[in-house]
Amino acid sequence: MDVFHDMAKVDSQSLTSSDRKRALDLCRKFIHQAEASEALADALNAQQPNFQGFGWLSIERLETLIKALDSSDDDRINTLGNLDPVVIIVCGLSLSTKKIKRMSADSWAEILRQAQVASTRLRRIILHDGKIAKVVMESSRTFKQRYEQLLKDNATALPQISQIMMQGLPYYSYTISHASKFDGLFDLAFNRVVAAYLLDSFQNFMILVRLLSLQ
């Protein structure tokens, strides 16, 4: 921010015409980029140390956008639908379908560019967010399959523990985004058939053991 304070102190009248034009071009470029970043703020905030999770408004926007992917005749929505699922989610958390359709072409192009850049930094957070997973699991089969494939691809790129042994018994792990798979497991656990543990993806894949029954 010091750069901007220093710029504000510059006497623009003392600059040559070419320097003023160059400064204006740079300022316009920055404003254009900053406006796109602000439009994606609800998703980008996940990078902040004090992030407390995505709000219900963001989740509702995401749900609406994912539903629109299968039924919209809008070129922008259709273009977005062909991109990486994480890019779609970054946009969906921040932008309503109405805003996407109404913004200028230049703004949309810059937002898409930044969403693709941000998706690499936000991928781990997004793929392990329970609220997002719930929305995706209730969405269309096509998007859900793409998302699940992405989870598999992402998982194979990371060190994994497929099972651990406790008291001579094997325990298997599932990521939080596969929470629906726990339904049957919990039923078995309460009947003293198996024990379950959850993978804590936010602490370097350390394992949090939840022993629901012991044989």
Image (cartoon, rainbow, N blue to C red):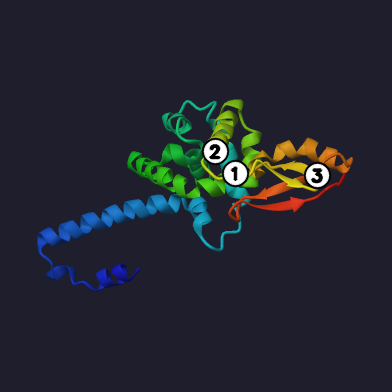
Residue indicated by mark 1: 160
Q: Is residue 83 visible?
A: yes
Name above or below for residue 112 compared with residue 15.
above
> Tag 3: residue type?
Ala
Q: CA distance from mark 1 to mark 3?
A: 19 Å
Residue at x 79%, y 42% (from the top left corner)? 169
Residue 156, label in figure:
2
Tag 2, which secondary structure? helix
The residue carrying mark 3 is 195
**Secondary structure state at the residue bearing disc 3:** loop
Which residue sits at x=33%, y=42%?
A: 106
Task: Report, in whole angstroms, how far the alpha carbon at label 3 lies from the one at label 2.
Answer: 25 Å
Three-letter amino acid code at the position of disc 1 = Gln
Marks 3/2 in contact by CB < 8 Å: the verdict is no
Which of pointers 1 and 3 lies earlier in the amino acid sequence?
Answer: 1
Task: Determine whether, in the image, residue 155 is placed left or right of residue 87.
Answer: right
Choose between 79 and 154: the one closer to the eye.
Answer: 154
Label 2 amino acid?
Thr
Q: Is residue 65 visible?
A: no
Secondary structure at numbered mark 1: loop
Number of residues whose C-alpha sits closer than 10 Å to that of mark 1, classed few (under 14), some (14–19) or many (20 or more) = few
> Decide: marks 2, 1 in contact (CB < 8 A)?
yes
Q: Quadrant of the C terminus?
A: top right
Residue at figure coordinates x 49%, y 38% from the top left = 88
